[in-house]
Amino acid sequence: MTQSMPYRMTRACLVVAAIACIAGCAGTSATRKEPVNPDPFERFNRVMYDINDLGDRYLARPVAQAYEAGTPTIFRIGANNFLENLSYPITIVNDFLQGKVAQGGRDLARFAINSTIGLFGLFDPASAAGLEIHDEDFGQTFAVWGLPQGPYLVVPVFGPYTVSSAVGDLAGTQLSLIIQKPDDTGVRNALMIWYLVHRRYSLLPADEQLRQAFDPYIFLRDAYLQNRRYKIYDGNPPLEDLYPEDEDDAAD
């Protein structure tokens, strides 16, 4: 049975509320301060990183390269617009959950314009109209609410996360039209594969940097955590180190 968007939004919000209650009962303080050691599961994470890297080297990256070589630029631009638009309800809902009411209204207008005039998101007339794109998710919302990001995790297949961003993305699946909209399982699976291939294609420019890193695992981890902080603070993170000064003492 097809579920309506209001139903999916309600279910996603219930998931978020449950997480907030659990975190509150666990005694987490209302602060964005991160744990002293953001990677307590490093041994496990390195194993997962190596497994993911193997799969990326022999499957994901070659497929992404073939996708780039076999499709014209205009197709990939349209694909990016289309897939981005299908996921945009996640940003809209989290705008409002973070109290960004004006931004939420603009993002709702952006989604409506691109879904209609933009032919289901293939084109981006909203940007031409001055409605800039935003990127909000439940992981950012949890941080705004004062919940900690939690330890760094490398998830099989999907790569780097924090506990908060992983749970947030799970909640976000209730709002993503890539997953929820198609009634046909084959269409839904095809959209998911297309999304994953396009996502890996978009990361191809960073491959050389990763290969040249002294320790690719640490390079990717630190880049991911810094990017999360950048998003949480809307591009203006506090001027402090990613790791507190007493990290070395805590590790002893």
Image: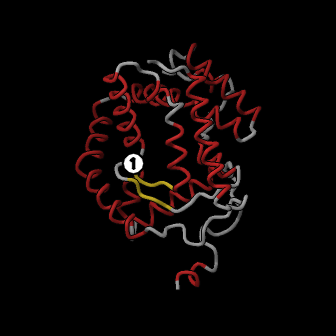
Identify the residue shown where x is 33% and y is 23%: 185
Quadrant housing residue 220 = bottom left
**Vertical placement of 208 versus 138: above or below?**
below
Here the colouring is secondary structure
Quarter of the picture holding the N terminus:
top left
| Few, some or many residues within 10 Å of mark 1 (<14, 14–19, 20+) | few
Identify the residue shown where x is 25% and y is 44%: 62
Question: Secondary structure under badge 1?
Answer: loop
Residue that protrudes farthest toward the left in the picture: 58
Position of 122 compared to 249: left or right?
Answer: left
Residue 121's x, y, as percent? 51, 21
**Vertical placement of 163 versus 243: above or below?**
above
Position of 16 compared to 188: left or right?
Answer: right
> Residue at label 1?
158
Identify the residue shown where x is 61% and y is 37%: 14
Looking at numbered disc 1 in the image, what kind of residue is underneath it?
Phe
Residue 250's x, y, as percent? 57, 81
**Vertical placement of 120 versus 227: above or below?**
above
Front-most of 68 and 1? 1
Front-most of 48 and 59? 48
Residue 17's x, y, as percent? 64, 42
Quadrant housing residue 68 = top left
What number of labels is visible? Answer: 1
Residue 89's x, y, as percent? 58, 29
**Vertical placement of 59 versus 84: above or below?**
below
